Image (cartoon, helix red, strand yellow):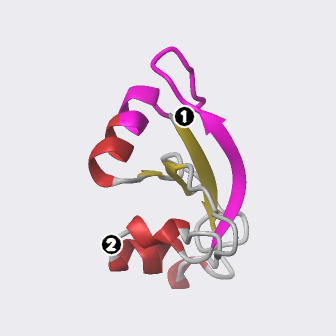
Amino acid sequence: MFCSIYKSSKKDEMYLYVERLEAHENSEAPNPLECLPDALRNAFGRASFVMDLELDESRKLARVNVLHVLDSIATKGFFIQMPPEGLINPNAVAPEGLRGA
């Protein structure tokens, strides 16, 4: 399966995998977010294209199991790769009780 990968404008390290969409002559490029439920679409924000990738069962991916990606795209039409657990944002605002400590 050929897929396209997009990154989220709202959350660092969040990526959307969808089956590669082909633009036909004299038509607009398809919107990759159309397959997402409204709540997820709002949380994802604007999709910025990262790359196209060929996926098969033997392919290794850095953070996710390729079989989960393929299954999710086949059943839901998309796969969302969430940020890794424990990812610390150095630019995040400190909680109210910790300011100036």
Mark 1 — residue?
63
Front residue (pair 88, 98): 88
Quarter location, residue 72 = top left
Disc number for residue 37: 2
Is residue 83 depicted above or below 91 in this figure? Answer: above
Disc 2 to disc 1: CB gap under 8 Å: no
Q: Quadrant of the C terminus?
A: bottom right
The answer to whether residue 65 of the structure is visible from this angle is no
Front residue (pair 88, 27): 27
> In this view, which residue lies farthest toward the left?
75
Disc number for residue 44: none
> In this view, which residue lies farthest toward the top?
58
Q: x, y percentage for residue 21?
A: 56, 56
Q: x, y percentage for residue 56?
A: 50, 23
In the picture, measured across the screen, residue 42 lies left or right of residue 20, that is left
Q: CA distance from mark 2 to mark 1?
A: 23 Å
**Amino acid type shown at disc 1:** Arg
Q: How many neighbours does mark 1 have within 10 angstroms: few (below 14), some (14-19), or many (20 or more)?
A: few
Q: How many neighbours does mark 2 have within 10 angstroms: few (below 14), some (14-19), or many (20 or more)?
A: few
Q: Which residues are magenta?
A: 47-70
Is residue 2 depicted above or below 19 in this figure? Answer: above
Assess whether residue 50 is covered by the magenta stretch: yes
Front residue (pair 43, 41): 41
Q: Secondary structure at mark 1?
A: loop
Label 2 or label 1, whichever comes before in sequence order: 2
- Report the residue at 67% width, 44% height from top: 52
In the picture, measured across the screen, residue 27 lies left or right of residue 79, that is right
> In this view, which residue lies farthest toward the front?
25
Assess whether residue 52 is covered by the magenta stretch: yes
**Amino acid type shown at disc 2:** Pro
Quarter location, residue 53 = top right
